[in-house]
Amino acid sequence: MKDTNRNTALALSCLTAAIVVLSASVSVFAAPVPMAGTGLFRVEHRPGPVLKDSCFECHSVIEGTSVVFKDDVHYYHAISCADCHGGDPKEDDQNLSMSAKRGFKTRVTRQATPGYCGRCHKNASFMRKFNPNLRLDQLALYKTSVHAKRLAAGHAGSAECVDCHGVHNIRAVSDPLSPAHPQHVTETCAKCHAATADLFRKSPHGRAFTSKEMPGCTACHASHATRPANRAMLTGKHGVCTDCHDAGSAGEKAAAEIARLLASLETTARGSKEALARVRVAVHTFDVAAIKRAAEPAMAEGKPGRK
Ligand code: HEC
Ligand code: HEC
Ligand code: HEC
Ligand code: HEC
Ligand code: HEC
Ligand code: HEC
Ligand code: HEC
């Protein structure tokens, strides 16, 4: 018994030594640390012998940007300020370090951010060095999305990368604290689609998806290639409902009824645009009776003799 203990202790100390050697050879060493009482963990970053980083050093003492950056997946991979913002991290002087001559780019606009992030994320030979399993198509998919098109059309309130992943505190999507983690997708979309999210949460899907750790909104709308929504999502070739509901099930029947209701509202052009928009939000109750109730004003508005 004692011998086994000694062997285990020996094996452990060898392992520790191996880890120390390993951590000295890579720039950063991280270990998941449980957060008391939450069931969550956080990754503790310990910079190893990293290169000079004047941006980080100076910004640590001003404003506190770098304090937040310590939780960032990029920081963990020793990708730092200058890798996104340009400039010279070896230069201590603020004016030299942040000069256009050294590649520093001023203010990042919301329209420019996707290209900024995509520069690395679509680059296979670069990304494979860090993680061979990470997909490389986020920017390509995002460009096809309704969000990208609205942003390009000048709607600054549309969604781009940092709205769903944060900035300076970007985390792996498997990290339970990431806003893109399945458990947080709904609240992330809710920042801009609050009424829709309210109904979704109270719906049978809200409860079922949460208990099954399924993402909310993106189960039907995708995360990067979000398309304009329409009733083709309910039935037929582009229907999403039958991904999970068998033919003849309550879910499939509801889908068919909701599609019929929307079709009759659209084709007869009854009701104002606003009234129709309210019905489309009400779809997220996935409750035929509730959607019919939401459709009543739209139906009534279109009736002759009513003002
Ligand atoms: C010696 C200190 C110092 C160094 C070194 C430094 N900065 Fe700054 N940085 C500042 C100060 C001060 C500001 C202005 C803050 C303000 O206006 O609120 C600033 C502003 C910025 C801004 C905002 C610019 C804008 O247009 O609004 C970014 C981005 C930035 N720094 C990134 C970097 C990067 C990247 C590096 C390294 C290449 C770097 N900084 C090096 C002190 C420094
Ligand atoms: C992964 C890329 C990335 C890294 C790494 C990064 N930033 Fe940023 N930073 C951005 C983006 C994108 C924005 C614009 C955020 C927005 O739209 O809200 C930004 C905004 C800023 C701003 C506000 C200026 C502005 O344009 O409004 C400052 C200051 C800044 N960053 C400093 C830093 C510092 C200091 C570091 C390193 C500790 C750093 N950043 C690391 C991507 C990055
Ligand atoms: C509307 C919200 C939203 C926007 C905008 C968005 N993402 Fe995502 N992203 C997500 C969600 C949700 C996931 C997790 C599910 C998945 O992988 O599709 C994710 C996953 C990722 C991943 C991990 C992929 C993997 O293989 O595990 C990366 C990297 C990423 N996004 C980068 C980006 C970049 C770069 C942009 C901008 C071009 C962007 N995202 C825009 C919501 C968004
Ligand atoms: C300088 C190159 C570079 C830039 C610019 C960059 N990234 Fe990354 N990003 C990486 C690398 C490398 C990783 C680590 C890959 C890994 O280990 O999974 C990463 C990881 C991520 C992850 C975590 C993926 C996962 O494992 O779930 C997300 C999300 C992400 N980046 C989003 C962004 C966003 C949003 C931007 C723009 C604000 C951005 N990145 C800009 C290189 C970059
Ligand atoms: C089970 C599938 C499903 C889920 C989950 C889902 N939606 Fe939808 N969504 C639909 C369908 C179907 C429509 C199309 C209604 C129409 O336009 O005919 C739609 C329409 C929309 C629209 C356009 C109408 C409106 O509400 O303004 C938005 C925006 C939207 N969804 C966002 C979300 C968000 C945000 C979430 C999560 C809170 C979500 N959806 C969850 C199926 C879904
Ligand atoms: C930063 C704000 C913001 C965030 C975050 C956001 N969206 Fe959007 N979304 C918009 C805007 C703005 C539009 C365009 C609305 C319009 O054209 O009237 C839009 C449009 C849509 C549409 C198309 C609606 C239609 O009428 O066809 C869908 C579907 C959608 N978003 C789903 C999502 C989902 C799912 C998420 C989370 C993964 C999300 N959005 C996160 C702002 C956002
Ligand atoms: C990602 C899988 C998934 C998709 C896609 C999906 N559902 Fe569901 N749906 C579920 C789950 C899980 C439940 C809960 C079933 C339970 O509690 O037994 C559910 C429940 C329902 C219910 C309540 C009745 C029942 O079967 O419990 C209705 C109605 C419903 N869904 C309609 C729809 C409609 C309409 C769509 C398409 C717009 C859709 N669903 C798309 C997974 C999904």
Image (cartoon, helix red, strand yellow):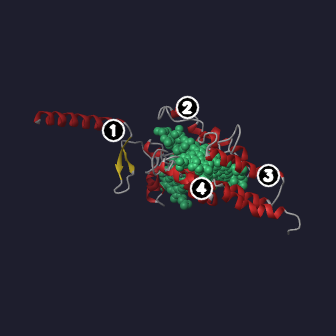
Q: Position of residue 229 (x, y in %)?
A: 70, 48
Residue 84 visible in the snapshot:
no
What's the amino acid at mark 2?
Ala
Please tell me which residue is depicted at 69% across the width and 57% down the height of the picture.
Answer: 291
Residue, disc 2: 124
Tell me whether the residue at label 2 lies in contact with that at label 3, contact meaning CB atoms closer than 8 angstroms. no
Q: Which mark is residue 264?
A: 3
Task: Pick the quarter of the image with the N terminus.
Answer: top left
Whichever of labels 2 and 4 marks the residue nearer the N terminus, that label is: 2
Tell me whether the residue at label 3 lies in contact with that at label 4, contact meaning CB atoms closer than 8 angstroms. no
Task: Pick the quarter of the image with the C terminus.
Answer: bottom right
SS at circle 4: helix
Q: Nearer the viewer, mark 2 or mark 3?
A: 3
Question: 6 or 296: which is nearer to us?
Answer: 296
What's the amino acid at mark 1?
Ser
Tell me whether the residue at label 1 lies in contact with that at label 3, contact meaning CB atoms closer than 8 angstroms. no
Q: Position of residue 236 (x, y in %)?
A: 71, 39
Callout 3: 10 Å neighbours few (<14), some, many (20+)? few
Cα distance between the residues tagged 4 and 1: 46 Å
